[in-house]
Every structure is written in C-alpha cells, then in structure tokens.
Amino acid sequence: MKDLKYLAAYSIPLVAILGIFLRGYWSYATIIYAFVLLPILEMSFPVDDSNLEESEIESNLKKKLFDWLLYLNLPIVFGIIAYALFTVTTQPIETFEFIGLIFTVGIVLGVNGINVAHELGHRQASKERFLGKALLMPSLYMHFYIEHNFGHHLHAATKEDPATARYNQTVYSFWFTSTIRQYFSAWKIQKRLLENYKLPFLSRYNDMLWYIIFQTGYLAIIFTVFGLNGLLFAFAAGVVGFLLLETVNYIEHYGLLRLKTEKGRYERVREIHSWNSNHVIGRIVLYELTRHSDHHYKSSKKYQILDCHEDSPQMPFGYPTSMVMSLVPPLWFSVMNKRIPKEMITA
C-alpha cells in the first residue's frame, strides 16, 4: 500500500477538474489547495529523512507501478487542457473565472506536466523521453529537455548556469534571467550537438526546430478549434506552467555555488550543491523532486529510490511552502541567506 502514496500527485488534477466543473470561486480552488492547504499539511506532518534498504531499492526498481504512475499524467494533463478549453470557450464565463482557470491549468502543467517531464527526460528509453517532451509542449518549454540534460546538469551551482539563482537575487528577477538564458543556452547546445556529428543547421536532427514546429502546431490547432479566446487561455496557462518550473529552479539551488580547484576548474557536483527537503507531502506530490541533492548526485536514479544525504543543505520547509515564501523576497532572504555557507557567498 505504501507504494500507492504517489497517487497523491493526482490530487492536484482532481481539484483542477472540480474547479473547471463548478467554476465561480471554485476556479481558484487549485491555487488554494496547492499553495495554502498543501503547505499547511506539509508543516503538520513529520519530516522523513529515512532511506530505503538495499532490498527495497531492488524491489522498487522492478515495479512497473512507479513508471505507470508517471505515464498516466499524459492523458490527465491533455484531458484537463481540453476540458478547460471547451469550458472557457463554450460556457458563459466571467473574467475572474477565466483568470482563475488559467492558473488552475497552469498549476497542472507545472506539477503534472513539467515535473513529470523532468523525471522522464532522464530515462534511457526513447519512448519515455518522448512522453516527457510531449508533457513539456503545453507549457511551450520543450527546449527545457536539451538545456536541462546537457546544460544544467553540467553547470549546476555555477554562475554559468541559467537555472542557478544567485545570492540575494529575487525570484522575479530570476524568472527573466533564467527563462531567457535557458532558451539561448538550449540553442547553443543544439548547435554544438549538430557540429559534433557534422550535421547542418537545417537537419531533421535539429530538435530545437522540431520543438518550434510542434509548439506552433499545438497553438495553431487550439486556435482553429477554440478560437482566439482558446489561444489566449492556452498560451497564458503555459506561461504559468513554466513560471512554476522556474520558481522551483529558484529554490533548488538558490545561493549554492561550486568552488574552484587550484587548477581553476569547478569542483564536481556534489550533494551539497542542491537544497534538499524531506517534508513528506512535498515529496509525494512532486514525485520526490524535493530530494534534489541526490538527483544531481546521480541523475539516472529513478524518483522512487532517491536518498537523503546527511551533508545536503536542508530546507526548513517543503517545496510548496518554499515556493510561496520565495514570492516575498525579504522573508525568503531572512530565512535562507543564513543557511548558505559563507565560502559559497564569496565564491
């Protein structure tokens, strides 16, 4: 039964469906659930820093249940998008409801779309990576696959990494710097990959071009079927989705920097270069994303076997709570700045 705890990740889509169906003030139910109720629950439950035994690890790796819990997010995400688009374009709806449902769908795109895409993007099987890229499409963030896997994991916790927030940088500043720098970084990586295989820019192996085609096609289909209002809704929900991702990026590495060796090179990425959280609610709702230190320590590990490292920097709250806290920069700085090693601040 304990394996089924990750069904909690489906609670956000369930609340979203309820909000779309009932509309009115219920349009904001997903926001309240994700960023008020979950943080309250998170602080109410005890922290669990235990790790699996070797036998449990082997058992969990053999269970296909953990994979199917990820795969099922694909029809859920696209089903909710379709349901929301049908609702806002065919039903009488107030402006405040329209805005609330944008955030509702955007939260689903961030949690059950991009977050699951991140996990699948690290898998070796091409079909799983394909599912991951498909889940990135509604957030118009397919380039994340390239930049994250070939850029972020190489440069994490350095000033060269767009997705590592600087000390005293606000989350609002980070939204702009990370979004823009990651996109151009993805193009640079793509160009380098093509050059390594001596392939031209206009090649069927240029994934960045395919991402533009797929995402433009996605929006074109929505415009054709649901009109301008549908297009505006889908685009705005996508923006909310990727801003949620960038908020998570912000808290994952805020202020943590790798030091340079005597040879002038960065030390290797270690478990001390990502913020870890063992708060139970955030862990199961986000498929163990909060054990981010171990993910960077060995990115090929599946979510169900990620460990907690004793020397990883620990967040005082879970990820949902920390995301809310980051939106109030003075509060965020007062809580987090004192937890950053001094040598990293001056690096």
Image: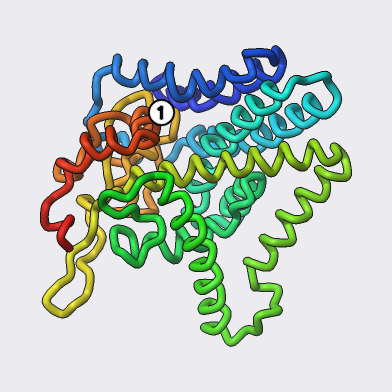
- Which residue type carries mark 1? Ile
Residue 282: give x, y in percent of width and height. Answer: 38, 29
- Classify residue 294 as left or right of residue 339: right
Answer above or below: position of 146 versus 219.
Answer: below
Residue 261: give x, y in percent of width and height. Answer: 14, 72
Answer above or below: position of 132 versus 99.
Answer: below
Which residue occupies the extreme bottom position in the image?
198
Residue bearing the label numbered 1 = 284
Residue at 41% across, 42% down: 248
Q: How many labels were placed on the picture?
A: 1
| Crowdedness near tag 1: few (<14), some (14–19) or many (≥20) residues, C-alpha within 10 Å | some
Mark 1 element type: helix
- Classify residue 26 as left or right of residue 79: left
Residue 315: give x, y in percent of width and height. Answer: 24, 36
Which residue occupies the extreme right position in the image?
224
Instruction: Name the quadrant containing residue 333.
Output: top left
Answer above or below: position of 50 versus 186.
Answer: above
Residue 341: give x, y in percent of width and height. Answer: 13, 50
* Rendered-image quadrant of the N terminus: top left
Residue at 41% across, 28% down: 284
Answer above or below: position of 278 versus 54.
Answer: above
Instruction: Name the quadrant containing residue 280.
Output: top left
